[in-house]
Amino acid sequence: MSGETTAKEPLIVIASNRGPYAFKLNEETKELVATRGAGGLVTALSAIGGEYDVLWVAAALGKGDVEWVRRHKGQPQIVDNMRISMIIPDRRRYGLYYNTISNPLLWFIQHELWDTPRQPSITASTWDAWREGYVAINQQFAEAIVSAIGDTDRPVLVFPQDYHLYLVPHFVREKLAERVQIQPFLHIPWPGPDAWRILPEHMRTELLTSMLNSDRIGFQTKTDAFNFVQACRFYLPDAHSYGSRDTIEYKGRTVQAVAYPISIDVERVEELAAAPSTRLIREQLLSSIGDYRMVLRVDRIEPSKNIVRGLEAFRALLQAHPEHRGKVKMLALLVPSRMDVEEYRAYLGRIMTEAGRINAEFSDAFYEPVRIILGQNYERALAAMQFYDVLLVNPLTDGMNLVAKEGALVNQRDGVLVLSEFAGAIYELGDHVLKISPFDVYGTAEAIHQALTMPYEERTQRATALREIVQRAGVKEWFSRQVNDALVAIKKVRETKAAT
């Protein structure tokens, strides 16, 4: 937290499943070491701690986190430039909340990944996970938020993050009424009404009505915001939009659905990309790649990222355009994710099988076309992004995809971005990328070929335009827009009260 706060300075409460820092216990010294968490949400929001008075509420996910909470007797503590508070969830309840409802049920609905003739089956155990896990953990988060806010007379802005915390607006509003502005932000896509048929009516209604206890809801794109409005109109008899694409009237409350396209911390990414440790990793990767041209992808291992079709497209490229054999390699930096969920473990198996097929078919004594590196290493990702010739980002659907923006910012080879039309980033970057359908393996292979054979002048023009777009709108601007909208709303409410 930077500087002293004044009585009227807003208190900003961010709530998310995973916090900005994880704590690990050094068994020898018994000291707790804080390391910044992974993931796009943490990467994006960590940049704003020095700009505002921030309290971040998250779940204690490891033994070190739990020990940190106990040592501080559950009281918020300043870490770097923001206050951190952690809840300690019951392990069984947390497992139900996270591994059954959040992932995969809600995640797969919102990315439209369910094979509905076969999955999912909403069983008694699913209902138990909803009541005993998802509802209970959301309530625990809300109680922690309410307790942290206390009796302050400062403006309070509550920002629940993402699909883990859909019920937090209801529980916070129940306790604090109109004392706070509640403004969730969804980092993942919000699909059209039909996708939500999978949820039983009670779950769906509880979820939607909780969200409508917000003052406004942030989405990555205007399409997501419009889909939310339509879902509310379709499933809630008392919800009306009166012809508006971005506003819902529900039981006396007017709720806005607003697009706030997320971005990256431009200054920090540029600083890390130029750091000595990143440069060292870059040289090591360049040495292992050699003189080959490189197709890069950087992804978490999960089905919506469409990694298998990306590999199939690379195989199709080598089959259809033999001139690239022995000259082009694919480097895939993949981060294991949610390996407790069977669908994710199975998907990793499919990835490794497809990579093995390509290498078996096209390798020779000196050439291995696909290299996969597993593990979380942000510096390695930034190092590789600096020298790709093609960056392949082909998700089936994606809220934004920050890899596309990071790559466009730090690449030094005038690399070409091949981007799925269903990534949220397409709305900002689409004029300067090679746009593909994520289902079109042939079209993706041809786009990679086009990128590899593109004239130098065109590559330079596209890369320069992409970099300028990313530099103009960083993550601080993204969050400031949300804060400013909330403060304007608070001012209007106070003026209305004063007038009456």
Image (tube, rainbow, N blue to C red):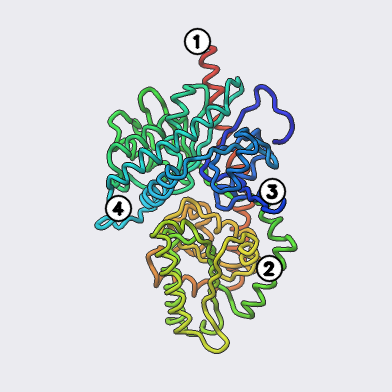
In this rendering, the label closer to the viewer, 3 or 1 = 3
- Residue 13 x %, y %: 57, 33
Residue 23, placed above or below residue 148: below
Labelled disc at residue 500: 1
Q: Amino acid at mark 1?
A: Thr
Q: Amino acid at mark 3?
A: Lys
Distance between the alpha carbons at the discs numbered 2 and 4: 42 Å
Q: Element at badge 4?
A: loop
Sooner in the amino-acid sequence: mark 4 or mark 1: 4
In this rendering, the label closer to the viewer, 2 or 4 = 4
Q: Residue at label 2? A: 281
Q: Residue at label 3? A: 30
In this rendering, the label closer to the viewer, 2 or 3 = 3
| Mark 4: few/some/many CA within 10 Å (<14, 14-19, 20+) | some
Q: Element at badge 2?
A: helix
In this rendering, the label closer to the viewer, 4 or 1 = 4
Q: Element at badge 1?
A: loop
Q: Amino acid at mark 2?
A: Ile
Q: Residue at label 4? A: 120
Q: Element at badge 3?
A: loop
| Mark 3: few/some/many CA within 10 Å (<14, 14-19, 20+) | few
